[in-house]
Image (tube, rainbow, N blue to C red):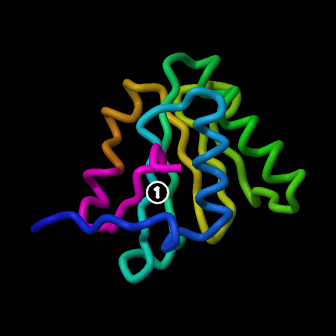
Amino acid sequence: MPRTTLTQAEVPTVVARAAELALERKGYDVIALDLRGISSATDFFVLASGRSDVQVKAIAEHISEELRREGTRPSHVEGLQGGRWVLLDYIDFVVHVFHPHAREFYQLENLWGDAPRWEAEDV
């Protein structure tokens, strides 16, 4: 079954902004998955990778700080101390910033393989 690709116009502004912020800190493989109609837990996942624990933390902190300045605060944050996988839960969307080994291990994009996706490099 072919994967559905979203345009930037189909992605909520705050989700696209989180992806853009990950790219600002040199995050890579930044994508958004549209989970509406697939999961009742959240509407979107933003997935990004950093090349080291330090970069993973820097990406997550940058997203959190900049979105907070713009009026959007996470309801929950996990993994910031470890830097292997940081989760920023904004209720309507969840940002996952991974170390490459953690992203490969958990394979969220494969687990949610039927979700329409948006490649943030298109920003």
| Residue behind mark 1 | 32
Q: Residue 81: x percent and y percent?
A: 70, 27
Question: For numbered disc 1, what is the local secondary structure?
Answer: strand
Residue at the (52%, 26%) spot, across then down:
50
Q: Is residue 81 above or below residue 123?
A: above
Q: Is residue 101 above or below residue 122?
A: above
Any magenta on residue 113?
yes
Q: Residue 101: x percent and y percent?
A: 37, 24
Q: Left or right: where does residue 3 sit relative to residue 89?
A: left
Any magenta on residue 11?
no
Relative depth, front residue between 98 and 120: 120
Q: Which image quarter holds the N terminus?
A: bottom left
Residue 38 in which image quadrant: bottom left
Which residues are the magenta region?
109-123
Q: Is residue 112 above or below residue 48?
A: below
Q: Residue 5: x percent and y percent?
A: 31, 64
Q: Is residue 97 above or below residue 38?
A: above
Q: Left or right: where does residue 91 sit relative to residue 66?
A: left
Residue at the (67%, 37%) spot, across then down:
60
Q: Left or right: where does residue 73 sit relative to residue 39?
A: right
Relative depth, front residue between 17 and 74: 17
Residue at the (81%, 58%) spot, across then down:
73
Q: Residue 31: x percent and y percent?
A: 44, 50
Residue 14 in which image quadrant: bottom right
Query: Farthest left residue?
Result: 1
Q: Left or right: where does residue 91 sit relative to residue 2?
A: right
Residue at the (69%, 62%) spot, across then down:
90
> What amino acid does circle 1 point to?
Ala
